[in-house]
Amino acid sequence: MTGISVKGLTKRWDTATAVDDVSFDVEPGSFAVLLGPSGCGKSTILRLISGLESASAGTITIGGKDVTALPPAERDLSMVFQSYALFPHLTVAENILFGLKVRKTSTRDQQNRLKRVAELIGLSALLDRRPNQLSGGQQQRVALGRAIIAEKPVCLMDEPLSNLDAKLRHEMRVEIRALQRKLGMTMVYVTHDQAEAMGMADRIILLKDGRIEQNATPAETYRKPATSFAGRFIGTPPMNVLALDWNGNDARFHGQNAGTTAPIFSGKPQTPVSIGIRPEEISFSASSPCRATVETVEYLGADTLVDCRIGSERLTVRARNADNLKTGADVGLSWPRDAVHLFEAASGRRRDDLLIGADA
Amino acid sequence: MGPTAKRTWIHAWLFLSPAMILLIAFTHYPAAVTLFHSFFSTPRGKREAKFVGLENYETLIADSTFWTVLVNNLWYALATIPLSIGIAIAMALWVDSKLKGRSFVRMAYFTPTVLPLIAVANIWMFFYTPGFGLIDQIRGAFGFAQQNWLGDPESALNAVIVVAIWKEAGFFMIFYLAALQTIPTSLREAAAIEGAGRWYFFRRVTFPLLMPTTLFVSVNAIINSFRLVDHIFIMTEGGPDNASSLLLFYIYETAFRFWDTAYASTLTVVLLLILFTVAIGQFLLLDKRVHYR
C-alpha cells in the first residue's frame, strides 16, 4: 500500500499565495480529508498532488517516490472531479474504460474489470447509456467507476458530492468510505462540508488561508480544536467563542457587570482570551449563577436552538425539551468543566495551560 | 373557432409575415420563376418567349462548357472544404491554447474574413504576378523559373482554390474556437490523469465533441464553394479556356454577358438541385454521427 507525504508544499501565483508551506503525511490505506472554507487552498493542494498544477516549492512523495516533477499519468493515482468530467459523447462503459484503452490493456482484461467495477458500483444495467441520460448520482458513480477501474493505489477526490442532494450525499458518503476500505486505497478527499469530513475521515487536515490549522482525527478535532477557527468550523451549530474580560483574577463575559454577576472562572489573569463552549454542552439549570436572557428560539424537532444574551455577548444553546422557552425569559446556564476551551484572543491558539489551576 | 383562438391565429400570422414576405418575394418566388423560365426560350427583340419543354435541358447535357464548369466546381469543393476545415481546426486549437499574444494571433487569423473578397483577390493578384509577385520572388531566390500561376490552365483553378481556402479558414476558425471553449478543461485533466496524449485526446474527445460544429461548418463550406466566385471576376474571369470557371460564374456569364436568360435559368435550376441534395444528404448522413449535448 502506498502513502503520501507532502513537505513544505507552496503554490504561488503572481501575487497570491494559495498554499503556504504545508506539510502532512497520509498513512497507506487511510482516508484523509482536506477540509476548509472556500479559498483555503484545499483544491489546489489536491491538484498539486495530482500533478495538474506544479508546485512553487516543496516536495510530494507517493509510495516513497518523489513525484514532484512528474506528469499526472506517472504518479500512479486516479482522480474524481467535482464536475465528474465525464466524456459526454461516450457511453458509461466507454467512459469507465477510457484509461484502460489509453494504456492499451487487453480487451479481455478490460471486459473482466468493467464487469467487476460495474457490479461494485451498481451500474451494470446502464453501461450503454450516455452521461446526459443519467441522474446526478449515477453520473457520480460513473466517475467513481472510472477512478477505481484503474486499480491505482491512490485516489484523489475533489468535492465529489457537492452537486448531489442531501439524501444522496449521505448514501454516497457511506458507499465511498466502504469502497475505500474494501479496495484498500489511500484516499485524499477535498470538501468544505465538515459533516462529510467528520463522517468519512481517518484524519482531518483543516486548512485556512493556505495553511494547516489542525491535522488530527475527527474525534480529536472535535474535542480539542487547536484554534478558535477549528472550533467554529467543526460542529453544527458552530462553537460559541466569546470574548472574556478580566477583573482581578476573575474572568467574565464581555460586558457582564463585575459587581452583580458571578465570574465564569478564576485563574491566571491578564492574557486576553476568549472562551469556547459547544452549544450541545450547555444546559439550562434554574439554580445556576450564570444568568442569560433568551433572544430567539428555533425549534428543530429533535432539539431546539436557543440564542441567549449574556453580558454583551451572544451564545447558542442546543437543548432538548426547550421549545416552551419564551423570548425574553431569564434562564440559568451551566456546562461541565471539561467543555471549556480557552483560546488566545489575538492568535486564536488553544491555551490549555491557562485552564490548569483555574476554577471554571 | 372561438374569438380568442381567432385572435391568436391572426397574431401568429402577423408575427410570421415580415420574414415570410421577404423570403417569398426574394427567395421562393424567384426560384419558382427560374424553374418556370427554364422551360421557355429566351425572348429576343420582337420574338416572345415560347414554351420549349425540356429543350434547354437537352442543350445543357450537350454543352461541354457546362460539364467542364461542373467538374471544376466539384474539384473546387473537394479541395476547399476539407482543407479549409482542417486548417480552421488547427488554427482554433492553436489560438485556444495558452499562448502569448493570443488575441493578436486570433485577430490576425480572422482578418481575411473581414476583408471583402474583391480586395483579397487583388492582394493575391500581386502574390501571383509572374516574375514580380511575392511567390515568384521567393521561388526566384531558390532558383526556380518564373511561373504564370493564373495564366496557365494547369494551375489557374488551384490558384483560385488557395485564395478561397485562405479566405474561409479564418471564418470557420471562429466557430471552432467558440466550440472549443465550451469543452470543460476538466475533461482534458481527467484524460491527463489517465495518461492520454494530446493526439489521443483530440481523436477520442475533442474531435467528436466538435462534430456539431463540423456539420454546421461543412454545410456552409459546401454552399460557399458554389457561391464564392467574386475573386474569379478579378483574377481570371474564368479563363484560360474555362479552366477556372465555376458554375455560378458560368451562370452569370450566360445571363448577363450572352443574355441567354432561359439557359441561365436552366443552369440555376441545376445549381439549386445540387445544393438542395447536398444539404439534405449531409444532415441525414451526419446527424447520426453528431453528438448534440
Image (cartoon, coloured by chain):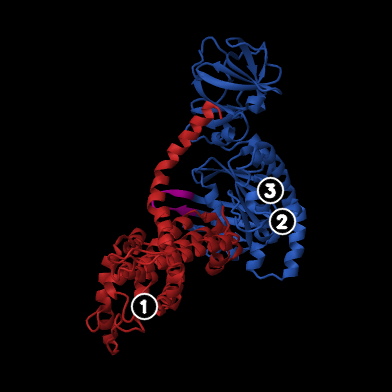
Q: Residue at x 27, y 83 (%)?
A: B136
Front position in the image: B220 or A207:
B220
The answer for how far apart the CA atoms under marks 1 and 3 are is 56 Å
Q: Which chain is red?
A: B
Q: Give the residue at mark 3.
A: A138
Chain bearing tag 2 is: A
Count the numbered circles shown: 3
**Which numbered disc, 1 or 3, marks the residue closer to the eye?**
1
Amino acid at dot 1: Leu
Q: Give the residue at mark 1.
A: B157
**What span is colored magenta in the figure?**
A10-19
Query: Can you say whether B177 is above or below B123 in the image?
Result: above
Residue A268 in the image, given as x and y percentages of width and height: 54, 26
Q: Give the residue at mark 2.
A: A127
Amino acid at dot 3: Gln
Circles 1 and 3: CB distance less than 8 Å? no
Q: Which chain is blue?
A: A
* 10 Å crowding of disc 2: few (<14), some (14-19), many (20+): some
